[in-house]
Amino acid sequence: MHYGRFHFGLRTLKTSLAVMGCIIFFYLTNRGSPMVATLSAVFALREDLPSTVTFGKSRIIGNTIGGINAFFYYLLHQELSNKIVAETLLVPLFVALTIIISISLKNEAGIIGGVATLLFITFSIPKEESFLYAFHRVIDTFIGTFFAIGLNLLIKSPLEDRLETIREKKIKIINKRNEINKLEQEIKELQHNKNSADN
């Protein structure tokens, strides 16, 4: 749908609905701020379901790495007396670790999400919380990604439907060709048996 220079497409609608779903879910379950979940939904939602699942998986892996590193950052940060020096040295170290681990796991697509999760958690951990806070933020990532996947399952674009129909028809053609090949093979065997019997 176009309004002058502005375009309101199906992906925009699905993204907005995924964000709305996260917000409603968080209010109903008293999970606190839906910020990480809504950001995950926005980052994960792509033009079609396969892309959303692939990117959602990368996002979850990246955020898990970032969340685990945030937990270790918190443990080290608590042991050091000079908090400014600790923050100045440890945050860049854990950013580098998050990137290195993501690359070693061949999860380059999840690097930005992983680093964003690390930074968000490290700079917003309430003083009284640590591991549980990081753990819940990683769970929030799962929630947002599941909303993105769910919306892509429920609302398919016309192009997706056409592509799916084309795929289904190609599979039918392959199956029919296999059936024809099998029937031709059976005919050859019958002719061979008939010729053998005639001789």
Image (spheres, grey):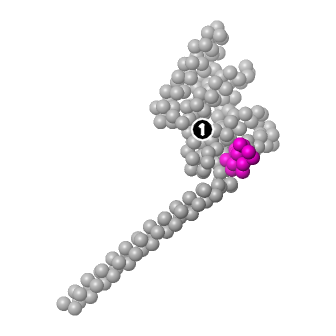
**Residue 165 location in percent, x, y?**
57, 63
Q: Residue at x 31, y 84 (%)?
A: 190
Q: Nearer the viewer, residue 177 or 89?
A: 177
Instruction: Work out whether 18 lies above or below 81.
Output: below
- What's drawn in magenta, residue-wise? 1-15
Instruction: Report whether 102 appears left or right of 131.
Output: left
Q: Residue at x 51, y 36 (%)?
A: 107
Occupied quadrant, residue 65: top right
Dot 1 amino acid type: Ile
**Residue 83 location in percent, x, y?**
65, 11
Occupied quadrant, residue 43: top right
Q: Residue at x 54, y 27 (%)?
A: 98
Q: Residue furthest bottom?
A: 198
Instruction: Work out whether 56 lies above or below 165.
Output: above
Screen quadrant of the C terminus: bottom left
Determine if the magenta segment contains residue 11. Answer: yes
> According to the image, label 1 marks what residue?
60
Q: Residue at x 59, y 23 (%)?
A: 72
State the SS at label 1: helix
Taking the image as drawn, is residue 160 in sight?
yes
